[in-house]
Amino acid sequence: MRIVAILNQKGGVGKTTTAVNLGAALALRGRKVLLIDADPQGNLSDHLGVDPLEAPASVYDVLLGEATVDEATVATSTPGLGVVPSHPDLAAAEQELAGELGRELRLRKALRALPADRYDWVLIDCPPSLGLLSLNAMAAAGSVLITVQTEYFAMRGLGQLDRIVHMVREHVNPELEILGILPTLVNPVTKLAREVIQEVRAHYGERVFATRIRQNVRLAEAPGYQDHIFAYEPGSAGAEDYAALAAELEGDASSEDATTQQVDTGPTRDDDVGDDAEPTVESHHAVVPEPSPPAADGAQAAAAPEAMHAATAVAEIPRAFVLPADLLGPDGRVRMPPPRLL
């Protein structure tokens, strides 16, 4: 049974998305997988349609010793994939356990009570902080998977996480290691993403996964349908990336070469990047205005500067965001509605 804590002290870097979809990818490969939602926000539970208030128990009860892992596990629609949900009361767990001896070992004790062959993989979704809940996850895990968004502050956060993992290894869990660093929300067509990945690789070498999770609209939509990417859109780039990550984790031959080639060639489908991505040449066509009927020489000369300005303003808008003509003012700017009085 391999226990992995998915960690980063920064929010919005793909921890929950990775826990859900990597877990689903492993389950679809025939593995028995348990997901543990150790984040009080409960996003993992919500992602898979598990209501913590209706579940028989939660990770909060497990930490307090009031339920076993088996009693708190909820089955999902995917065979082999189970969830220990979060609970709103989990936010108070640090205060409730503050005076307890061995409070950082509660989750490890609960997981060690399971038969060794109960699960092949246990993935723990950690909160965006390095408090008691994350410490419990690192104490219980054999390794840490760190998700890194490809942005400027990535290296600074990685350095802090590296020190924290070293301290936990030294004082709490000597077996803890970094399983790998996973670049997420990657837009392969941007120079920034490539530079950040190169910088991370320069510092961490082979500890950086060959797989990179691209920006993908379908990954963002799947939680709204309370399912993982393989059920929501199995042909999407997000499904491809998490399937490649599962293959890489399990040591499949050729997964590294295939993934690197897939990422380096940039987006290959319309759902690869989100609305905030830099537009590619193919998606940024100018809009040519319809020719107007001939006008008198004087009127044509007077209207020429205004028409040219309006046409230029419209041409700068990407095809997907062309606005109706009645929303553009004479100066080419979007007309704003008058403020509403409350």
Image (cartoon, rainbow, N blue to C red):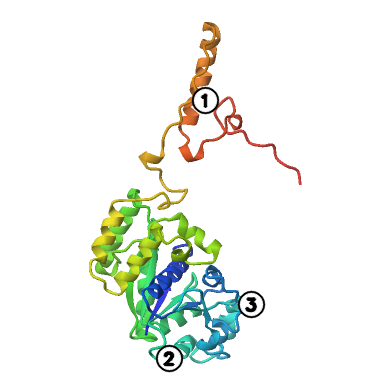
Q: Which mark is residue 310?
A: 1
Quadrant in the rendering for residue 208: bottom left
> Is 8 above or below relative to 337?
below
Q: Earlier in the sequence, mark 3 or mark 1?
A: 3
Q: Position of residue 100 (x, y in %)?
A: 54, 90
Residue 135, position as x, y percentages in the image: 45, 80
Q: Are marks 3 and 1 in contact (CB under 8 Å)?
A: no
Residue kind at label 3, given as amino acid type: Leu
Query: Going 42% across and 62% down the picture, which residue do you hit?
Result: 234
Contact? badges 2 and 3 (CB < 8 Å): no
Q: Which residue is mark 3?
A: 53
Identify the mark at residue 319; answer none if there is no mark.
none
C-alpha separation, residue under disc 2 versus residue under disc 3: 26 Å
Q: Amino acid at mark 1?
A: Ala
Spatial CA distance of label 3 from label 1 is 55 Å
Tell me the residue that label 2 is attached to.
112
Residue 133 seen by the camera: yes
Q: Secondary structure at mark 3?
A: loop
Q: Nearer the viewer, residue 233 or 319?
A: 233
Between discs 2 and 1, the one toward the N terminus: 2
